[in-house]
Amino acid sequence: MTAFKIGLLGPSRVGKTSLVTALISEGQQLLAGSGVAMLPDGRATEDKIADNWEQLQGDLLAGEFTPGNLRGTMEPFYFRLALDPGVPGARIGIELLDFPGGWLAGRGRSAHSESDWDACRSFITRSTALLVPIDAALLMETYEKQHVKLLPKHLTTTQVESVAREWAIERNRRPHEPALIAFAPVKCEAYFNDNGGLRNKSHLLRQKFDEVYGGVVAAVRAEAPHAQLLYTPVDTLGCVEMVKSDWVLNEAGDWTFDAKYRVRRDRKISRMGVDDLMTAVSQQLIQGKRTMTADESADLIQRAQQAQDLADRSEGFFRDVLMWLNRERQARREAAGRQDREAQEAVRRLQSLDTVLEKIATRKFGPRVQRL
């Protein structure tokens, strides 16, 4: 099963794992009733998702959501998922790589983690889609100049730009492959009023994004003009309101940002914006899968035709009689039949996969999404 690669690019504790959990949950909802399942492919992914979900559920029960309390990723982790339409051999594999955000900055990597980081960068550059989660609260709740100066460090924008540029260069070398980069501000519940929120500061959030991430956008656009660039704000939980945010000077003399949220009474998770991310990813999947499966189908059809030509080809009167007697002609025709059935199955897989993905990919983006 060939896997489509999706890279994640963001600093520590920005919410990469929570974003993956949200994507999986939203994908399952969008596919409900379609006969297609989105499944964890392996125990490790299943356990990782369950662990993150349990942490979020614990916060909801406690009535307080503190993002900084969620356990960060300590080692590279490959989320392995499968879209299963119920057709033998038609599963679509999806791999997402989460890595310690501290590795983006060289000072956050130890000597023994350099080779692991090289592997992460290789995965990212080979990914057809790149998701860049951004801490919306950090952008919006930073006012004083001494703290504003810390934004590039805490958001690792210099390092994000460097890796995103590498990704874009590799995508430009493969213009026949899809290329998507989605900048996804997370924890946007406090800045939109379309999901139960009390205020709408979405225009200011976009302005802050342009100020801080304008260089990253420009770098990608310059290196990969054909790439699709999207601005896709998402709500991490939807049912929370920010009650406090502050910059705190810790014992080591470093400034850290802290935000706390209260949980609304209904405690119903509503991840606005995640469906837009799934739509964008599905568009990439269907484009890439069509190309790959079409090539596979064409190859099998060609081999089926060659087998049929061999089965029907005359070898001369005496040779034909001998082939009939020793059943070689029958064996050739049986082989041709198998080849033809394989070709038809490949075409059926293509049609099945297209139908499945188009259910999501043809959805229109919501009003939050903006093309860059």
Image (tube, rainbow, N blue to C red):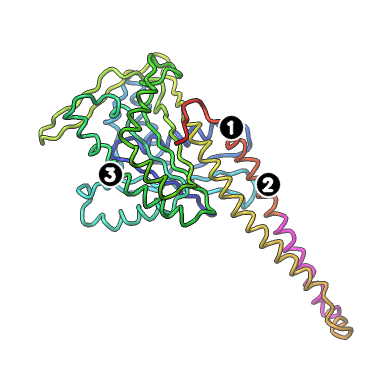
Horizontal placement of 303 versus 11: left or right?
right
Q: Residues within 10 Å of mark 1 (few under 14, many from 20)?
A: some
Picture coordinates of residue 61 (x, y %)? 35, 21
Which mark sits nearer the N-terminus, 3 or 1?
3
Q: Label 2's element?
A: helix
Q: Label 3, label 2: how many angstroms apart (C-alpha)?
A: 43 Å
Q: Nearer the viewer, residue 364 or 322?
A: 364
Which stretch appears magenta?
324-344
Q: Label 3, label 1: how many angstroms apart (C-alpha)?
A: 34 Å
Q: Main secondary structure of the magenta part?
A: helix
**Does 324 sit above or below residue 308?**
below
Going by the numbered disc 3, the residue's amino acid type is: Thr
> What residue does disc 3 label?
158
Which mark sits nearer the N-terminus, 3 or 2?
3
Going by the numbered disc 2, the residue's amino acid type is: Gln
Tags 3 and 1 in contact by the CB under 8 Å rule? no
> What residue does disc 2 label?
351
Quadrant location, the N terminus: bottom right
* Residue 47, image quadrant: top left
The residue sitting at 24% across, 47% down in the picture is 105
326 in the magenta segment: yes
> What residue does disc 1 label?
363
